[in-house]
Image (spheres, coloured by chain):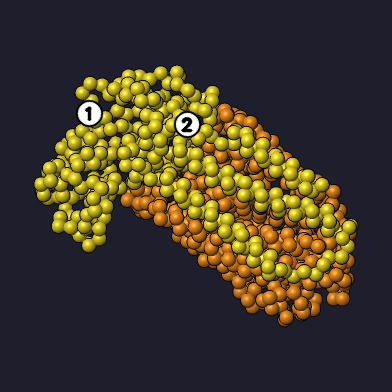
Chain colours: A orange, B yellow
């Protein structure tokens, strides 16, 4: 087999060239993916510290550790960092960059130089926004609602410019992926044989390319209004603050699917591999992915049911939003259908799959509450919304990411992670997550508004449970990070295909050689053709 | 075994349901109908969630590789896929329709509703009543009588939220938004600001003080009400203040003293003081501009051929930016008053125009 010779060959993307400059100037999609991964995880740590700060202050009513102004900066940085610097690029830019070209049987992405440019564009935007930490900070909330964001005396302008710049990185990556998927598929890799991770990244890329420019223009208008006093959103200058919300959500709602579709793509990879069965309803899942992407463009107004927009708009947006739930449900049922009569391997990535299904189902169902216009009126802008989108973003994207990270760790590094700590962390994260966020559904329904530095004494118990949960969650993440670091040093040699996967990344060496394959791969069947006789192929168990 | 487990989970949820602590008190009829659809959503979700989790548990028990060595080759099942598309679709449309029906009740104020003007500003709520009384932090209303709030903001976005009434609306500078309710529980009902508005956002609280008819009349006539003697908010017992922390104004029910002007009278005085009466009559006479008399809530034809309904938002726009929508047959000669009038003054003038039936 060509795979064995690749390993014996000894050349891989890590040892192919040496020195720090060979990384910083690399055009290799795998190295760029790893650079993204590392950078994003640094920002994830930062955003996580802000989250722990928020939960610590909310441990009891009254102000304990910070002033309200500091608290307002904490939740703004937590939101802005996690959304713009972590969740949006996490799976596409880090994992997608590494895995997508290999799954296609390509040597690299279509435009390797643009790929590197997009990394540095992301980095400079993120650093520019992050520099405000050492200036006056930013207190507008990650949504930058006008006119507060125009009048705020903080360093909001730099954060807006940072997010504006990071948008170009997102557009470039999206464009690169679209062209790569169209042009660089291996012989025999027809559209009907594409792994579902590729389909998910394809849909995501389309949203990135089409929606991000709207955010860019909106943020730029806000910057112009702050610096030159051009009245677009501030009623004092003749502007319309509701218009800002329309512009903002026209991007930011599709952005929710930029965040969650790749996570769904990862789950679609993991379920068949660890069930040893073809994915249930391949076409339905691919179609549902595009269904969600399409509908995502015409539901932005459901963020604005109490904003003062017209009754008619509320009717239409509530109705269309219902259509999001249908393809989402189709996916969940299809993943379950894949497990039915499978031969399930309960390895760590599969644990995260179960965690994902548990948490994401709650996230999806509570989304229906917020889609029903009258129910939303009471729940919007309370902790119910906070809980809902953490169940979708963390439960959906982050848990899927962790599943993918353990799944592809052997491919990224050639080493296997240590199983014990990985399992412990998976359980801690799952339990910690639910302890943190489930009480927030209740406290929100009771009426506790979001973005409150201080709260009524009645909400204390539920907030304290939530804070305890955040500590469990934090410990879980620390264990994952430490385990990954230790496994890099002391992990067992993983082998090329520890999970017995059938997609192309498992048909090359771990870690892959410089241009991914020693011999150009030819694809002869679909990505999940787990026939009975293939059950034990390459299994590490 | 798995059946037992799923029943246990179901019972767990049932006990939460029975425990009233998951919802604020429902103090209006709208809140009651909100609760009905809310529980319908909760129970439907519980059924789906328990089903999905039960399936996962059963699959792990029955199909893990130790007991189920060989997987069965299945690529899909069209029938099942149709079922799990169609059934959720039907349920979702029921939810949408029911939600819409409740929403209609939520936003359509009865025509006899008592109007109170609300101004949100960093970081307090100001309430202005027809008779010229105003209060800060505390909104005094009679029970069992519909109340409609006409709201605007003096600075940034705010949002007016009363959990016990299940109503909420953003309060937006430069335009009017509305909320209505009919409190059926006398006493205190908590008000929150739910749109982030800066430093003391979480201190921007308030109370609806729902008074029985006789007490309400006493308050209107200027008598001070001892709020501590009223029943506490049933959803937040033990919390009686209208602000968190310190440094924020306390409730002051400045009852109307002898000779105090009503809101409409203040508006009338303003139209003289600001020079409006030079071009606008109050008796139907056509001057340079249209008369104020009897125009509110009517449709009027504009110079560009469109028709517009004269409501609070149209009057505000015509004061601040008069050339935006000029009535047909009149010159676009009025100067913009943007920035020259306070939020209170615009509300008073609007109230005056509304009073000229």
User: Going from the N terminus, do you reach mark 2 or mark 1 first?
Assistant: 2
Residue B275 shown left or right of residue A276 in the figure: left
- Report the Cα–Cα distance between label 2 and label 1: 30 Å
Residue named by callout 2:
B190
Q: Quadrant of the C terminus of chain A?
A: bottom right
Chain bearing tag 1 is: B
Q: Are marks 2 and 1 in contact (CB under 8 Å)?
A: no
Residue B266 or residue B218, whichever sits in front: B218
Q: Tell me residue A344's x, y (percent).
A: 82, 59
**Residue A46 relative to residue A211: left or right:** right
Q: Residue at x 36, y 36 (%)?
A: B147
Residue B96 seen in this snapshot: yes
Q: What residue is at 47 percent from the left and 57 percent from the top?
A: A317
Quarter of the picture holding the N terminus of chain A? bottom right
Q: Position of residue B272 (x, y in %)?
A: 15, 37
Examine the rendered structure and indicate whether residue A69 appears above or below residue B57.
above
Secondary element type, mark 1: loop
| Marking on residue B56 | none
Does dot 2 land on a helix, a strand or a loop? Answer: strand
Identity of the residue drawn at 58% across and 51% down: A367
Chain ID for label 2? B
Which residue is found at the position 64% from the left and 59% from the top?
A: A329
In the shown orientation, is residue B3 left or right of residue B144?
Answer: right
Q: Give the residue furthest to the bottom.
A: A187
């Amino acid at each position: 087999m060509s795979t064995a010779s690749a390993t014996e060959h000894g050349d891989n993307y890590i040892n192919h060239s040496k020195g720090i400059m060979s990384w910083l100037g690399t055009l290799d999609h795998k190295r760029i993916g790893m650079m993204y991964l590392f950078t994003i995880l640094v920002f994830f740590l930062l955003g996580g510290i802000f989250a722990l700060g928020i939960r610590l202050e909310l441990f009891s009513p009254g102000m304990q550790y910070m002033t309200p102004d500091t608290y307002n900066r904490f939740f703004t940085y937590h939101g802005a960092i996690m959304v713009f610097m972590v969740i949006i690029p996490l799976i596409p830019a880090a994992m997608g960059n590494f895995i997508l070209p290999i799954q296609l049987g390509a040597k690299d992405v279509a435009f390797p130089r643009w790929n590197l440019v997009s990394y540095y564009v992301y980095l400079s935007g993120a650093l520019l926004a992050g520099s405000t930490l050492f200036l006056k900070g930013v207190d507008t909330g990650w949504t930058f609602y006008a006119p507060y964001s125009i009048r705020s005396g903080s360093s909001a302008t730099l954060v807006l410019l940072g997010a504006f710049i990071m948008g170009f990185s997102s557009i470039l990556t999206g464009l690169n992926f679209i062209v790569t998927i169209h042009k660089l598929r291996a012989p025999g890799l027809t559209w009907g044989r594409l792994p579902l991770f590729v389909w998910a990244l394809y849909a995501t890329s389309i949203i990135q390319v089409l929606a991000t420019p709207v955010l860019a223009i909106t943020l730029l208008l806000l910057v112009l209004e702050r610096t030159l006093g051009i009245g677009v959103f501030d009623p004092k200058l003749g502007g319309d603050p509701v218009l800002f919300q329309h512009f903002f959500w026209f991007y930011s709602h599709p952005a929710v699917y930029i965040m969650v579709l790749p996570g769904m793509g990862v789950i679609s990879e993991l379920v068949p591999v660890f069930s040893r069965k073809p994915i249930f309803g391949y076409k339905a899942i691919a179609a549902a992915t595009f269904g969600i992407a399409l509908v995502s463009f015409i539901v932005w107004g459901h963020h604005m049911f109490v904003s003062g927009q017209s009754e008619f708009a509320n009717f239409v947006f509530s109705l269309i939003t219902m259509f999001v739930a249908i393809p989402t449900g189709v996916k969940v049922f299809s993943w379950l259908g894949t497990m039915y009569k499978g031969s399930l391997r309960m390895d760590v990535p599969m644990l995260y799959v179960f965690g994902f299904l548990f948490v994401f189902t709650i996230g999806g169902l509570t989304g229906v509450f917020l889609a029903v216009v009258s129910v939303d009126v009471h729940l919007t802008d309370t902790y119910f919304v906070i809980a809902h989108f953490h169940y979708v973003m963390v439960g959906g994207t982050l848990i899927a990411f962790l599943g993918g990270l353990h799944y592809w760790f052997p491919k990224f590094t050639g080493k296997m992670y240590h199983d014990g700590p990985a399992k412990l962390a998976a359980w801690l994260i799952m339990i910690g997550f639910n302890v943190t966020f489930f009480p927030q559904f209740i406290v929100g329904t009771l009426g506790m508004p979001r973005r409150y530095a201080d709260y009524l004494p009645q909400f204390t118990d539920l907030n304290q449970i939530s804070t305890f949960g955040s500590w469990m969650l934090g410990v879980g993440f620390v264990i994952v990070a430490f385990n990954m670091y230790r496994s890099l040093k002391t992990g067992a040699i993983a082998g090329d295909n520890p999970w017995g996967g059938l997609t192309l990344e498992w048909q090359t060496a771990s870690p892959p050689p410089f241009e991914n394959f020693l011999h150009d791969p030819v694809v002869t069947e679909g990505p999940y053709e787990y026939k009975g006789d293939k059950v034990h192929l390459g299994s590490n168990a | 075994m798995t059946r037992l487990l799923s029943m246990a989970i179901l019972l767990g949820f049932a006990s939460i349901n029975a425990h009233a602590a998951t919802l604020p008190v429902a103090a209006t009829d709208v809140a009651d109908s909100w609760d009905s659809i809310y529980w319908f959503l909760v129970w439907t979700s519980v059924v789906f969630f328990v089903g999905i989790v039960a399936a996962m548990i059963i699959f792990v028990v029955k199909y893990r590789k130790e007991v189920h060595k060989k997987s069965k080759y299945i690529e899909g099942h069209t029938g099942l896929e149709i079922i799990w598309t169609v059934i959720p679709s039907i349920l979702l449309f029921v939810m949408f329709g029911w939600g819409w029906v409740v929403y209609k009740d939520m936003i359509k104020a009865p025509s006899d509703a008592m109007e109170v003007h609300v101004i949100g500003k960093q970081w307090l709520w100001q309430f202005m009543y027809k008779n010229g009384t105003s209060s800060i932090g505390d909104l005094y209303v009679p029970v069992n009588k519909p109340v409609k709030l006409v709201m605007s903001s003096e600075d940034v976005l705010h949002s007016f939220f009363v959990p016990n009434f299940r109503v909420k609306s953003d309060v937006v500078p430069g335009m009017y938004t509305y909320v209505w309710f009919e409190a059926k529980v006398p006493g205190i009902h908590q008000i929150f600001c739910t749109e982030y508005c800066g430093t003391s956002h979480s201190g921007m609280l308030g109370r609806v003080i729902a008074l029985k008819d006789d007490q309400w009349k006493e308050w209107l006539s200027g008598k001070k009400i001892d709020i501590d003697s009223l029943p506490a908010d049933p959803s937040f017992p033990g919390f009686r203040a209208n602000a968190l922390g310190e440094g924020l104004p306390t409730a002051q029910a400045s009852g109307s003293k002898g000779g105090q002007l009503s809101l409409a009278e203040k508006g009338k005085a303003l139209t003289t003081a600001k020079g409006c009466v030079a071009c606008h009559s109050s008796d139907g006479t056509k001057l340079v501009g249209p008369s104020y008399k009897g125009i509110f809530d009517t449709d009027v034809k504009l110079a560009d051929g469109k028709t517009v309904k004269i409501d609070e938002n149209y009057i505000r726009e015509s004061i601040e930016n008069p050339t935006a929508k000029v009535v047909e047959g009149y010159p676009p000669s009025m100067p913009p008053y943007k920035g020259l009038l306070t939020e209170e003054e615009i509300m008073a003038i609007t109230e005056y125009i509304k009073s000229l039936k």
